[in-house]
Structure formats: structure tokens, C-alpha cells
């Protein structure tokens, strides 16, 4: 997903999986990837990347992107 300010790598997972060690290891790798992608983007005038690990039950009809970003952003620009 892309906003005016950044690019987002959003990963929804079942709520009972977000504390699983394999999921967390993959999330750490995604955070590292976002860090490298953001560093590269800065050199070419691009947007930074952020990673969100989102429990499935947080994705509702009333959920907003700003709310999901505030609650689940793992890697910051």
C-alpha cells in the first residue's frame, strides 16, 4: 500500500499467530527489509517504508488506516 508520505508493507495474520516465534522472526526480517528499502529510497528521493503486523480481528469495517498505523506500525520511516 502507498500513501502520500510512505509505502506500507502490511501483513495481516490470525490474532493467535501474531506472537508465534516463526511469525515474529519473519516480521523482524520484514522490518530489516523496510529499513534497507527506506535507506535506498532516501538516496533516490523516494518514500520511506513501514511494516505493519496486523491481527486479523483488528481489520474491521470501522478501522482506519491511521488507526492501524498507530496501533501496528513496526518499522518507522
Image (cartoon, rainbow, N blue to C red):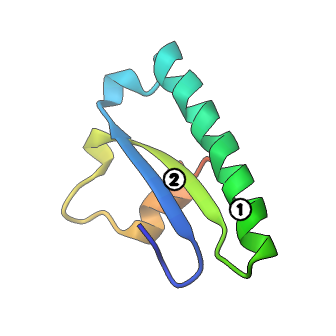
Q: Residue furthest left?
A: 61
Quadrant holding the C terminus: bottom right
Q: Residue furthest front?
A: 44
Q: Residue at x 48, y 78 (%)?
A: 3
Residue 77 visible in this rendered orientation of the protein? no
Instruction: Tell me residue 69's x, y (percent).
Output: 51, 61
Q: Which residue lies under the disc numbered 2? A: 71
- Disc 2 vs disc 1: Cβ atoms closer than 8 Å? no
Q: Is residue 22 left or right of residue 49?
A: left
Instruction: Tell me residue 51's x, y (percent).
Output: 55, 51
Can you say whether 75 is above or below 24 in the image?
A: below
Instruction: Tell me residue 52's x, y (percent).
Output: 50, 49
Q: Is residue 60 left or right of residue 64?
A: left
Quadrant holding the N terminus: bottom left
Label 1 crowding class (10 Å Cα cut-off): few <14, some 14-19, many 20+?
Answer: many
Q: Earlier in the sequence, mark 2 or mark 1?
A: 1
Q: Residue at x 63, y 32 (%)?
A: 28
Give whichever of 43, 55 is nearer the camera.
43
Q: Residue at x 72, y 51 (%)?
A: 35
Instruction: For marks 2 and 1, give the CA distance.
Output: 21 Å
Label 2 element class: helix
Q: How many marks?
A: 2
Label 2 crowding class (10 Å Cα cut-off): few <14, some 14-19, many 20+?
Answer: few
Residue 9 visible in this rendered orientation of the protein? yes
Q: Is residue 37 left or right of residue 67?
A: right
Q: Which residue lies under the disc numbered 1? A: 38
Q: Residue at x 58, y 23 (%)?
A: 25
Can you say whether 25 is above or below 50 in the image?
A: above
Mark 2 vs mark 1: give the one in front: 1
Instruction: Tell me residue 62's x, y (percent).
Output: 24, 66
Amino acid at each position: 500500500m502507498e500513501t502520500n508520505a510512505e509505502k506500507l508493507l502490511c501483513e495481516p495474520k490470525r490474532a493467535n499467530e501474531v506472537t508465534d516465534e516463526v511469525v515474529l522472526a519473519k516480521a523482524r526480517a520484514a522490518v530489516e527489509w523496510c529499513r534497507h528499502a527506506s535507506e535506498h529510497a532516501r538516496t533516490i528521493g523516494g518514500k520511506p517504508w513501514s511494516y505493519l503486523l496486523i491481527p486479523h480481528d483488528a481489520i474491521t469495517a470501522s478501522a482506519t488506516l491511521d488507526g492501524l498505523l498507530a496501533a501496528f506500525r513496526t518499522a518507522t520511516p
